[in-house]
Amino acid sequence: MAVRAVRGAVQLERDDSAHMHDQVSELLTAVLERNRLAADDLISIWFTATPDLHSDFPAAAARKLGIVDVPLICAQELAIDGAMPRVVRVLAHVETGLAKSEISHVYLGAAATLRKDIAQ
């Protein structure tokens, strides 16, 4: 097993706690499914949110999914002029047999434009 990092992001339509939970849950589920991972394979997850998101912690969605014994942390993205608004990003550290080139980074919806070079 190797330690790998998996990236992802989603743009929210609005700053609403329930909407954030739905979108972040969808993102985490896609990260796990596309990389054939289980919650036991997770080492830690970093979440960032753009400064315009205040309704809840993105990590709360992970806890609702049952990811309860994995260290999670939330941070705020830099406030850069012209940056995409209402974005939650994830950086998950995982144990996997996948090679780096086999890792599927997940950028949902409009967030796919953030990293056209690695979004799948």
Image (cartoon, rainbow, N blue to C red):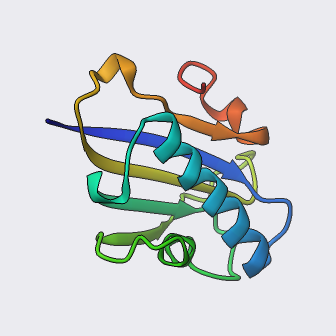
List x then y, in percent, for residue 13.
Answer: 85, 60
Instruction: Using the image as rendered, state which of residue 106 and residue 52 is in the foreground.
Output: 106
Q: Which residue lies at the image location 51% right of the left edge and 35% below the top edge?
A: 34
List x then y, in percent, for residue 54.
Answer: 68, 80
Q: Is residue 41 visible?
A: yes
In which quadrant of the rendered image does the C terminus lie? top right
Farthest left residue in view: 1
Q: Which residue lies at the image location 46% right of the left edge and 69% below the top edge?
A: 75
In which quadrant of the rendered image does the N terminus lie? top left
- Horizontal arrangement in the rendering, residue 95 relative to residue 114 (left or right): left
Residue 97, compared with residue 75, is above or below; it is: above
Q: Is residue 42 visible?
A: no
List x then y, in percent, for residue 93.
Answer: 29, 49
Instruction: Using the image as rendered, state which of residue 103 and residue 53 is in the foreground.
Output: 103
Residue 49 found in image quarter: bottom right
Q: How many marks?
A: 0
Q: Which residue lies at the image location 47% right of the left edge and 62% below the top edge?
A: 47
Residue 104, compared with residue 49, is above or below; it is: above
Q: Which residue lies at the image location 37% right of the left edge and 77% below the top edge?
A: 68
List x then y, in percent, for residue 60.
Answer: 53, 79
- Horizontal arrangement in the rendering, residue 20 relative to residue 71 (left or right): right
Instruction: Using the image as rendered, state which of residue 4 and residue 88 is in the foreground.
Output: 4
